[in-house]
Image (tube, rainbow, N blue to C red):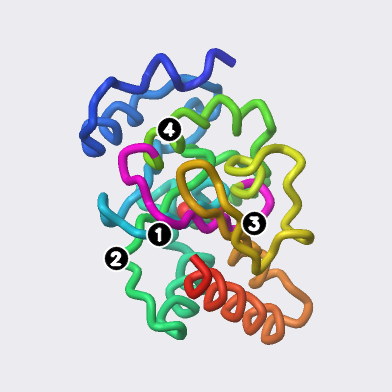
Amino acid sequence: YPGAAQYVPRTEDLATVRAAAERCHGCDLYRDATQTVFGEGSATADTVLVGEQPGNDEDLDGHPFVGPAGHLLDRALAEIGVDRDTLYLTNAVKHFRFVERGKRRIHQQPRRTEIVACAPWLATELELIAPRLVICLGAIATQAVLGPKAKVTALRGQVVDGEHHRVGVTVHPAAVLRAEDRAQAYTAFVDDLRRLFAAG
Ligand code: URA
């Protein structure tokens, strides 16, 4: 893949960057996805949350974390007293990757090549927002921010120092929805978030 770098404009203005991302052909995911789903929220946020990629609902709606995983995230944030509007929410990959099964579109994890191709968008978001803390939700976000060897199982609930910001790791809210013991997984997720916001 050529990657997103050639599509990223040289500007300090996040809205200009977002508009340019609508036309990104840095990998092939734009072909089947409905639209680019760029990050959203406060451009001066103290904390940026990074997910994996837009899901089915986000792909159709054009906004991050508006589907079931987003609702769970909203509930968890409310529980720890964090206002979503003070944050910036984005994803490692900006297009939905899926396979069609009849009428359903089944989420597929982005490939490493797609994560790398899309990385210039996330890097630019983090550079312009310059948050104090970046919270990675799940394996793909963790790898996108901390490198391909970083493991959620080893890092969850912890905050590590990065060059430009601190980085906290927890699971993806969709993983909570899939967990066998959902109540327990949800409590652990909320505990992680509480700890990360406190430590960051
Ligand atoms: N899952 C993600 O990782 N990101 C979204 O925006 C929605 C669901």
What's the amino acid at mark 4?
Trp
**Residue at horizontal 37%, vertical 40%?**
125
Report the residue marked by disc 3.
138
Q: Mark 4–mark 1 contact, CB under 8 Å?
A: no
Q: Is residue 139 magenta?
A: yes
Report the residue marked by disc 2.
86
Crowding around mark 4 (Cα neighbors within 10 Å: few <14, some 14 to 19, many 20+) is many
Specify which label sits upstream in the sequence, 1 or 3: 1
Q: Which mark is residue 121?
A: 4
What's the amino acid at mark 3?
Gly
Say what secondary structure mark 3 lies in: loop
Image depth: mark 1 or mark 3 in front: 1
Image depth: mark 2 or mark 3 in front: 2
Specify which label sits upstream in the sequence, 2 or 3: 2
C-alpha distance separating marks 1 and 3: 16 Å
Whole-percent x, y for residue 90 in the image: 43, 49
Q: Is residue 137 magenta?
A: yes
Assess mark 3: CB under 8 A from ligand 1? Answer: yes
Whole-percent x, y for residue 155 in the image: 71, 60
Crowding around mark 1 (Cα neighbors within 10 Å: few <14, some 14 to 19, many 20+) is many
Specify which label sits upstream in the sequence, 2 or 1: 1
Say what secondary structure mark 4 lies in: helix
19, above or below 136, in the image: above
Regarding residue 192, the answer to whether it shows in the image is yes
Report the residue marked by disc 1.
47
Whole-percent x, y for residue 118 in the image: 51, 30
In the image, which residues are magenta?
A: 127-140
